[in-house]
Each structure stands twice: as structure tokens, then as C-alpha cells.
Image: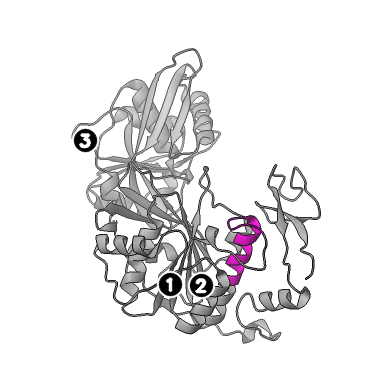
Amino acid sequence: MAKAKTAYVCTECGADYSKWMGQCTACQAWNTVSEVRGISGNGKASRGARFDGFAGSLSSVQSLDSVSLSEQSRISSGMQELDRVLGGGLVEGSAILMGGHPGAGKSTLLLQTVCQLAGQYPALYVTGEESLQQVAMRAKRLGLPTGDLKILSETSVERIVQIVETEKPRILVVDSIQVMHVSDIESAPGSVSQVRESAAFLTRMAKQTGTILFLVGHVTKDGSLAGPKVLEHMIDCSILLEGSSDSRYRTLRGIKNRFGAVNELGVFAMLEQGLKEVKNPSAIFLNRGEEAAPGSVVMVVWEGTRPMLIEIQALVDVAQGGYPRRVAVGLDQNRLAMLLAVLHRHGGMHIADQDVFVNVVGGVKVNETSADLALLASIVSSFRDRALPQDLVIFGEVGLSGEIRPVPSGQERVYEASKHGFTRALVPKANVPRKPIENMKVIAVSKLSDALQALDDL
């Protein structure tokens, strides 16, 4: 038997090294280079056979204009929110990686999906962490149709591929990729080499057979997918299911998608019958009190291909202990500190001796800059202890020189706010709708000082 080769791979970027290093020279990350045991088989012949045609069937060189441009057929998952995140449905031969914290509902969502699809398409659910009885009990508790779904308890990738060749399922779920292992790799399941080789083996099989592959992946403390970073490069679509255990709502966000737009957001509610899709997310995020409170304002963010109305709250109080705190939940904390500096320089408000706490209601994470103006408005409202009107919606990006910059799809945001009963909107000047909207007063601003004056006049 040939001696197994040893290499060292960076778990962040996948760079290879001949010896261990404290810092990866490719991505500059520290303590990410780990040992990887190579294949202990008969060398180049077996390795070459395993990696032939990774992206599908083998083909010859051809010109780009001769490639067929026919659209790939899609299969509806039965859930509009899941189809939205996936870009319109399931694509044949695609590999989809679903990540999330323990208890977020990854297995529940996939079990609901494949149980509904099993009546129309052959489906196989492979569980490596739970027993068959546990999966069956969950399906019974959720009231799912189980007569057509086939289930398997297995962790060997070679064995799974053999069964797939026999059963020929249209949809395959592997739960989870961290417990799968390839016999040629000597390291333990969950290691960098095992996760990478197992994912590559299953992805190649899915593309060559046209099988829709779902891989379940765990996440680390900071919310990133556990295992090597190259795992995200192998698959076609990466989606992340987020939600704390004390909240009934879960958000499904697209991180990578070769067949659709990224940053799409799907919202689900965790009920006794499983995950139920929320088709109007703005309604649950706008569950406000009857009386207006200082520090509360509604903003319009753009998630993927649709606008969403979300409430943002701020609390400004005198710092205790001499060291003011800056806490942001659902927003970038560094951007909060930057906007506070802009507010002081161009708004004339001194809050360096104040604690500032901001929170996005509903547990949603806002990454776009259109929340800047609404964030500053909520901070000013709390600092002055003056409530803003409940029929007011705000959005816009704030620059370092105090200018209010336009945001994409500004007119669509105003129309969405009008549909939900808002009658006033504070928006950048370039985002004012060309045609007046019935029962909607649009206030256009171009500088931060103008926005603060408009808030005083309300």
C-alpha cells in the first residue's frame, strides 16, 4: 500500500502548503492552516478517476457560441419563500448547501420539502446524525405525508452513491456533510479533508446524474459555515437559516446562488406544525404599539428583489461609568460609530457622553446603507425624547460629508410604504417618485441638516 501523503490546507481560502504555518500567506488569516491526510490508495489512477468530470459529464473543447443556451428546468419546492431564495425553484443537477445554528430548523425545513415533493418525484433522505426513528417521529409530529419518501441512515459516501445509482432519486438530502466520510481518507469525519472530499464526491455525482442535492452544514460561533472555505466554492447555492431559539421567526438568506440573485430573504414562522412561510414579512415586523414612542421609526430596506418595511429602535442615555457604549443589534457596529461622528460634525449634536443602543425589530440583519438616515432619525428622536409620527417612513444613505445619497429602487420603496398605510416619507431628493402618490407626502432632502430640520417640522 502506498504511503499516505500529508499536506496542510488553509480552512479559510483553501491554499495548500507543504508544511504547517501559523499564518496563511494567501489570505493573511492566522491559525487557519490545518493538516490534511491524503489518499492512501494506489496513487494517480484512483485519484484521477475520482475527479474526472467534476462539473458534469466529460466534454471536448468547443467555441463559446456553440454552447446551448436553453434555460435549465426548475422544480418548485412547494414553498414560495424557499423558491424565492433559490432563484425560482430547484435546478436539476444543482448542489445546495443549507447552513444554520443547531435548532434553527434546517432538518425540519428540508424534511417538509422532500415529504411534499416525494409524491411527484423520487426522493431520498440520508440521515447521518439522527436515527430513522427520530426522523419518523418528527415527520409524524408535523403531520407530513411519509408514504412516498425513502430514508436511509448512512455516513459512508461510497455507500450513498451506490444506493443512489440503484434507487435513482430525483432529490437527495444529506444531513449533515460534517458526519460523512470517504474511506480513502484516513482522517476523522468532520475534518477539513473529509468534508472537502465528501462534498466533492457528492457534488460530482449530482451533476453527472442530474440529481438535486441538498447538503446540511453546521455553522461556527460567528455564523460562518464550519469546515473548509472551499466547501462554499464547490456547491452552486449556499443558503443560511437564521433565528434565535427564543424567537418564533426564522429568516432564510441566500449567500451564493449561481442560478439567481443573492441576498434574497425568505421569512418563516416556527409553529407546532413546522416551519410556515410568511408571505408578507412587513406585517410581522411592523407590529408596533398604539402610541408613538421616542426612538422608534420605520425604514424600507431592499432584500433581493422585494422591499421590506422594518422598524428600528434607538435608546440614548447618559453614559454610566464614563465610558459611553455603542451597541448595535442587526446593524454594523462600525457603521454606527461612523454615523454618530457625521451627526456630530454635520448635525451639531454632541452625544459623545451618551450610551447609544440600536436594535432592528424582529431579529433581521440589515446590511445595506439605506438604513443610515432612519438610524440617525431614531437616535435624534431618542436623544430629544420626542416621538416621530407613526405614519412616517424613512430611508437614505448618509455620506461622510453630510450629504443624503440616493439608494437603489427608491420609488418602489415609497410605493411599498404607501400600500401599508404610511402617508409621509423622508427620502433622498433623487428618490422622489416622478408621479405623485395618492395620500402620500414625500419630503425630499439632500443634506443631513435639511433632514434634521424636516424632523423638527413634523
Mark 3, Cα crowd under 10 Å, few <14 / some 14-19 / many 20+, is few
Q: CA distance from mark 2 to mark 3?
A: 45 Å
Q: Which residue is mark 2?
A: 94
| 439 in the magenta segment | no
Marks 1 and 3, how far apart in space? 40 Å
Of 373 and 361, nearer the camera is 361
| Residue at image point 73% right, 56% down | 15
Q: Position of residue 264 (x, y in %)?
A: 43, 58
Q: Which residues are magenta?
A: 187-201
Residue hosting label 1: 90
Mark 1: secondary structure: strand
Q: Nearer the viewer, mark 1 or mark 3?
A: 1
Find residue 149 and report its horizontal and vertical position in percent. Answer: 35, 74
The answer to whether residue 434 shows anywhere in this view is no
What is the count of numbered marks?
A: 3
The residue at the far left in this view is 290
Q: Residue drawn 65% across and 83% down?
A: 58
Question: Which residue sits furthest front?
Answer: 1
Q: Do the numbered discs 1 and 2 sit on residues whose CB atoms are within 8 Å?
A: yes
Query: Mark 3 highlights which residue?
Result: 289
